[in-house]
Image (cartoon, rainbow, N blue to C red):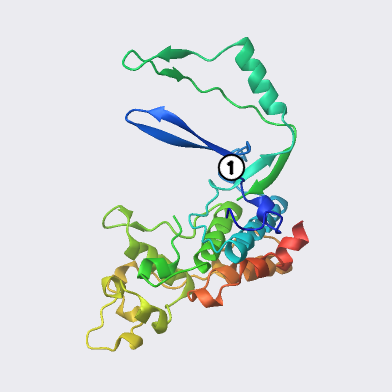
Amino acid sequence: MEISPKDQPGSEAVRKLLDTFYIDGPGDKHRCLVHPPLFESVLTFLRRNPVERLPSAVIAVVLIRLFSALDYLHTECQIVRTDINADNIMFGIKDDSAFRDLEEEELQRPVPRKEVDIDGRIIYMSQELGSPNLIGYPVLCDFAPEVILGVPWTYNVDIWNVGCMIWDIYEGDSLFTGQDPEFEKYQSRAHLAEIINLLGPPPPSLIAQGELRDKFFSAEGKSITSLTYGDFRTENLLTGQVPLEERETTLEGQEEREAFLRLMQKMLQWEPRKRCSAKELAEDEWIHKHL
């Protein structure tokens, strides 16, 4: 990113690195990064909403900025972001009132602190940051199926992650949890079963590319290219396909509902090549309708 053009569209939606410095630590130096201050994450903003769902207008702003940032990262920087979730997307701050208030509070009522006897370090308590008057734009457990199967992956995994995240914060429910009833914790086999229950059987060509296919599918004399979801080792986790159309229960109006589902289907595809690019998604009709 250091050599990528800083004035390219989308670069403004990626958090900038202003400076670096080092501090001495126990036995080593620690590198510290200086970024512009931001407000709170989309997840924190979501949890302050009593219904724990974000309205369409907020989702549209988040998406247009996110897809702009991803297009910049993918095309100009050749970077796969990975780990896209609502806790990693931050709102900016258009005014510094919250920081001024924080400074004034610290001057008037400094936070408690103590010195550690061993090495003289000082430990400070945290002080709560108040809310700014103006919140800025957002700045940039959902593994894509190719990651679970061990298929070589690229930029398309980011698109899958966005689709999962948007469903979670807009519908107020997770598409996938990966919770295995036998082990009572996340298991990749349970996660893959949930994807099958949503999208139907994976293409045999995708299974054939997976280095981990034997972990999930039993060939039993079949050629690799003929494996189907019927050969899934843990069939008890397959509950029958329930597509997005049947899971969506909150939107009102057929046109609105169909437009949102079309957006989701552009991202949630078994085959990475069938997912739309970030640039294409930034032009989606549902997003622009709500901006």
Q: What residue type is labelled 1?
A: Ser
Can residue 62 be seen from the camera position used here?
A: no
User: How far across and down, in percent of the image, does residue 249 sit?
Assistant: 60, 60
User: How far across and down, in percent of the image, does residue 46 sit?
Assistant: 60, 44
Residue located 37% across and 79% down the image: 209
Q: Quadrant of residue 26?
A: top left
| Label 1 SS | loop
Q: Quadrant of the N terminus?
A: bottom right
Q: In which quarter of the image is the C terminus?
A: bottom right
User: How far across and down, in percent of the image, does residue 101 sit?
Assistant: 68, 21
Judging depth in this view, the residue of 47 and 60 nearest the camera is: 60
Q: In this view, does 146 lie above or below 288?
A: below
Q: Mark 1 points at which residue?
A: 41
Residue located 64% across and 22% down the image: 102
Judging depth in this view, the residue of 257 and 70 nearest the camera is: 70
Q: In this view, does 152 lie above or below 51?
A: below
Judging depth in this view, the residue of 83 and 123 nearest the camera is: 123
